[in-house]
Amino acid sequence: MSGPLYVPVLPTKPHAAGAFRGLWPDVRAAIRPLWNLPPLPGVTPETLATVVGKYVDPVSAVSRHGGWIDAPFGEDAQIAALAEALAVYCEFGRLRPVTGPERTGAQQAAAVETARRSLRGLAVRVRVMGEWDGRLGEDVRGLLAGTGPEVPVDLLLDMDAVLDDRPDAGKEALRALDALMPLTVWRSAALLGGAFPRVTADMVEEGWCEGSRADWRMWHEVRATDRAYAPLLGYGDYGIQPPGALAQAPAPGRKGGPPWGVLRYTTDSSYVLVRTATRGPDKIAANRAAARRITELPEFRGAGAGQGEEWLSDCANGPLSVSEGSGGPAEWLRAGNLQHMTYVVRSLPGG
């Protein structure tokens, strides 16, 4: 069993595609993203292919080393059209289809058929929101029975949000893996979890806050066991956004939003969040000060560590008279993902 060093769970949105495209080539080569389509409420099957293309064309173009494409929020009436639209990127691109035990029979069958046609294999994404439910293992067994030995399968054990309020996440992940790993010869297996918290105004009322890397601890806890599969288990996370961000439906033309945002930085043991401003007369000064707060951290890795750090350094040292380079919400997300993904790959064995 072998697989990618790192599996980030990313939205099919411009900031994520831009960040992945901007990574240094050796970092990008170690990553296989799990791209997620957002919910598409009200989109008819007749127009789905066009809408899917808008989201998936850019991420397919940057996924030259492979990855997966998932539509976890697809409505029942959209399943057939979604499968047909996504199959193009699996058969003629380098992405692989995804299914899971909680999906409908129609979605599972369509994903398996796409995997057979594309010859690239299939990912089984098993979500564990709290305690492990043994019935999921039986459901995965049934799914695999209909897949056939000719289709290579990857296991993506998705623990969803793994914050400090889930101290037993490592134990639950082990229970799940102990049940799932014997079911077949998995081509690869990765443990995914989201630990960047959902940011509220209260959290950054003092200007900044820190959150612990509970998902990182969970992965190390599992890897430290004596299970035969432990040394081969890949690491995955949700980048710098919480899992719930994937479920936000598109809102074209939406205006407004809060007067603040955040810069995010990843250290060995924590996630640092620093408040920024989206408007107001002091916006430029506030945003450069926020970047400076990060660059002055003892854990800051320096402008040469990656494109994310380079952007933060440029922002911190930019002129107060010019707004260019002080960023906005999309740029802050892009810079955050750049520094985070680069640091994760460098932190992993073999990275």
Image (tube, rainbow, N blue to C red):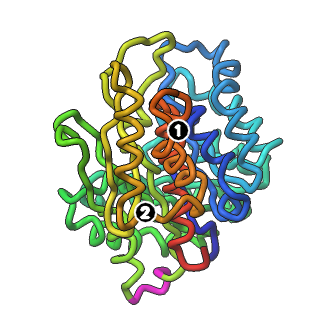
Q: Which residue is mark 2?
A: 300
Which is more toward the observer, 255 or 102?
Answer: 255
**Quarter containing the C terminus:** bottom right
* Rendered residue at 77%/35% (across/down): 88
Residue 77, horizontal then vertical, whole percent: 53, 20
Q: Relative to residue 333, is residue 260 depicted above or below?
A: above
Q: Which residue is mark 1?
A: 11
Name the magenta segment's main secondary structure. loop
Residue 127, horizontal then vertical, whole percent: 39, 52
* Rendered residue at 67%/33% (across/down): 56
* Rendered residue at 41%/11% (across/down): 255
Q: Quadrant of residue 227?
A: bottom left
Asked if residue 203 lies left or right of residue 124, the reply is left
If you read the primary sequence from the N terminus, does the residue marked by circle 2 or circle 1 appear first? 1
Q: Secondary structure at mark 2?
A: loop
Asked if residue 65 lies left or right of residue 306, the reply is right
Q: How many marks?
A: 2
Q: Which residues are magenta?
A: 226-230
- The residue lying furthest to the bottom in this view is 226
Residue 34, horizontal then vertical, whole percent: 57, 49
Q: Relative to residue 335, is residue 295 depicted above or below?
A: below
Q: Nearer the viewer, mark 2 or mark 1?
A: 2
> Label 2: few (<14), some or many (≥20) within 10 Å?
some
Which is more toward the observer, 40 or 266?
Answer: 266
Q: Secondary structure at mark 1?
A: strand
Q: CA distance from mark 2 to mark 1?
A: 27 Å
Question: For the residue marked with disc 1, what is the amino acid?
Answer: Pro
Question: For the residue marked with disc 2, what is the amino acid?
Answer: Phe
Residue 72, horizontal then vertical, whole percent: 49, 37
